[in-house]
Image (tube, rainbow, N blue to C red):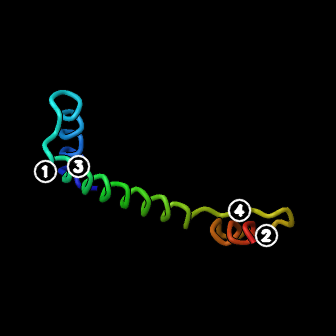
């Protein structure tokens, strides 16, 4: 994640708490949050790709495969 993105998010959050944001700044903040959350979700999904579950019978399956089975 880019440092500039986080710095700008934090800058807008601080300004929102102190003096408030203009309409343009509110729109920018929404866009930045959307980008930020997308990156967090992608990182979390990538983490889950590396997680495995050991079944009771001793077999090891990827988490996402075990989760799909559990839902059905």
Q: Which residue is mark 1?
A: 24
Q: Secondary structure at mark 4?
A: strand
The alpha-carbon separation of the residues under discs 2 and 4 comes to 8 Å
Give the mark nearer the N terminus: 3 vs 1. 1
Front residue (pair 45, 71):
71
Residue 47 placement (x, y as % from top left): 51, 60
The quarter of the image holding the N terminus is bottom left
Front residue (pair 32, 27):
27
Label of residue 69 in the image: none
Residue 27 placement (x, y as % from top left): 20, 53
Q: How many marks?
A: 4
Q: Residue at x 75, y 62 (%)?
A: 54
Q: Secondary structure at mark 2?
A: loop
Q: Residue at x 79, y 69 (%)?
A: 59
Task: Determine whether label 2 and label 1 are within 8 Å by CB.
Answer: no
Give the mark nearer the N terminus: 2 vs 1. 1
Front residue (pair 5, 52):
5
Q: Which residue is mark 2?
A: 59
Vertical side of 65 occupied by 55: above or below: above
Q: Residue at x 71, y 68 (%)?
A: 66
Q: Nearer the viewer, mark 4 or mark 3?
A: 3
Vertical side of 17 occupied by 71: above or below: below
């Amino acid at each position: 994640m880019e440092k500039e993105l986080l710095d700008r998010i934090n800058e807008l959050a601080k300004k929102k708490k102190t003096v408030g944001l203009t309409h343009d700044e509110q729109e920018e903040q929404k866009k930045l949050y959307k980008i930020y959350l997308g990156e967090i979700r992608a990182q979390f999904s990538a983490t889950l790709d590396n997680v495995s579950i050991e079944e009771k019978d001793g077999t090891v399956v990827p988490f996402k495969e075990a989760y799909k089975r559990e839902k059905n």
